[in-house]
């Protein structure tokens, strides 16, 4: 009974990865838009935008908006996800972790989750519905070297 389930999950993986990428990018872009433009509740729910050029908030918001949109659309996905992941690692260790050890205690849960989610996207790639495929074509599948191929049941 697990064979049909494995077949289904293997076929669905690129689509589920794409959905994960789109949702993660959208949520990240919303954080950036809130901080840059004061929309969606504004910076940290204050209803205000972060002052232009202020360190690190304004720069983080630019990365959130641009990185989130690029990841959501699947354009330069791995590079955008890498930069986004790094910005969230910086945010966690510079802004949250000094207040307490655990994310639940220091308010850094979102930073930690975004950091790891984007790092996952760096390694898994954009999935199936990426604009990179439209502009640059589907990546070629390279055959695994003979030594790495699974033995056949001949």
Image (spheres, rainbow, N blue to C red):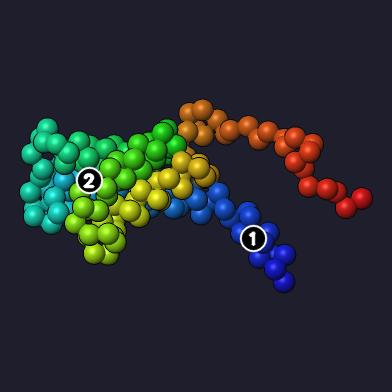
Front one among 125 and 19: 125
Residue under label 1, please give it.
8
Residue 6 in view of the camera: yes
- Is 36 situated left or right of 139 in this image? left
Say which residue appears at 83% left-offset and 48% top-offset: 151
Extreme residue toward the top, this view:
136
Question: Can you give x and y, in whole percent of width and height, for residue 55 in the image?
Answer: 14, 36
Residue 65 in view of the camera: no
Question: Can you give x and y, in whole percent of width and height, for residue 86 in the image?
Answer: 34, 40
Residue under label 2, please give it.
94
In the figure, 8 relative to 119: above or below?
Answer: below
Question: Can you give x and y, in whole percent of width and height, for residue 148 in the image?
Answer: 75, 41
Kind of element beneath mark 2: helix
- Is 63 situated left or right of 127 in this image? left
In the figure, 37 relative to 27: above or below?
Answer: above
Which image quarter: residue 66?
Answer: top left
Extreme residue toward the right, this view:
154
Disc ID at residue 140:
none
CA neighbours of label 2 inside 10 A, class few (<14), some (14 to 19), many (20+): few
Front one among 110 and 129: 110
Q: Earlier in the sequence, mark 1 or mark 2?
A: 1
Kind of element beneath mark 1: helix
- Is 114 situated left or right of 105 in this image? right
């Amino acid at each position: 009974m697990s064979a049909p389930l494995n077949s289904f999950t293997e076929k669905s993986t690129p689509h589920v990865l794409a959905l994960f990428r789109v949702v993660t990018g959208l949520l990240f872009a919303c954080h950036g838009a809130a901080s840059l433009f004061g929309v969606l509740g504004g910076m940290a729910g204050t209803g205000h935008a972060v002052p232009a050029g202020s360190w690190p908030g304004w720069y983080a918001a630019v990365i959130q908006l641009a990185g989130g949109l690029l990841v959501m659309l699947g354009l330069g996905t791995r590079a955008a996800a890498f930069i986004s992941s790094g910005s969230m690692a910086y945010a966690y260790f510079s802004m949250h972790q000094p207040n307490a050890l655990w994310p639940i205690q220091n308010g850094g849960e979102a930073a930690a989750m975004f950091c790891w989610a984007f790092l996952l996207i760096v390694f898994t790639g954009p999935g199936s519905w990426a604009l990179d495929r439209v502009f640059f074509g589907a990546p070629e599948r390279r055959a695994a070297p003979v030594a790495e191929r699974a033995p056949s049941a001949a």
